Image (cartoon, rainbow, N blue to C red):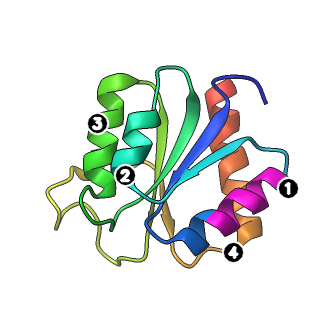
Amino acid sequence: MQSGQSIMIVDDEPDITYIIKKFLEVNGMEVDAFNDAEEALSHFQTGMYALSILDIGMPKMNGFELYREIRKIEPKVKVCFLSAYETLGENRGFPRSELKCVLKKPISMPELVKHVRWEMALIVA
């Protein structure tokens, strides 16, 4: 995968990022995984990632806060939120209109790969 086509995964649970990273890599995708939102933000650069998968419920900086910060750096990056919560956004002060991609935990790895491929195809198109 060329520069700008990589995927960034941010989840505070190392087991989750490990499994997702390995499964996406086996399926031919380039992935960087982080367990700390602030660390992910410090590594984020314009044009580096085509897709970011952000857990919503993280300590220090939640996924919505991270989303706002990375959008300041790269307004065009595609973001999918990963969450075990039943209700999103509306109870967390996040506009529903910005929740274009939400992946519900638990998600099967084949379903995740299918969804990521779909999101990446939309970027290329």
Rounded to the nearest whole Å, what is the CA distance between mark 4 and mark 2? 23 Å
The location of residue 21, given as percent across then percent down, is 69, 57
Disc nearer the start of the sequence (1/2)? 1
Residue 87 relative to residue 90: left or right: right
Check disc 1: other Cα within 10 Å, few if <14, some if 14-19, many if 20+: few
Name the residue beneath numbered marker 2: 37
Q: Is residue 49 above or below residue 87?
A: above
> Quarter-wise, where is residue 50 in the image?
top right
Residue 124 relative to residue 41: left or right: right
| Amino acid identity at mark 1 | Val
Q: Is residue 20 magenta?
A: yes
Name the residue beneath numbered marker 3: 69
SS majority, magenta: helix
Rounded to the nearest whole Å, what is the CA distance between mark 3 and mark 2? 10 Å
Number of marks = 4
Disc nearer the start of the sequence (4/2)? 2
Q: Give the range drawn in magenta.
A: 18-25
Rounded to the nearest whole Å, what is the CA distance between mark 1 and mark 3? 30 Å
Which secondary structure lies at badge 3?
helix
Closest to the observer: 67 or 36?
36
Quadrant for the N terminus in the image = top right
Mark linked to residue 26: 1
Nearer the observer: mark 3 or 4; the answer is: 3
Q: Does the magenta stretch include residue 22?
A: yes
The answer to whether residue 125 is seen in the rendering is no
Which residue occupies 46% across, 43% down?
79
Name the residue beneath numbered marker 4: 108
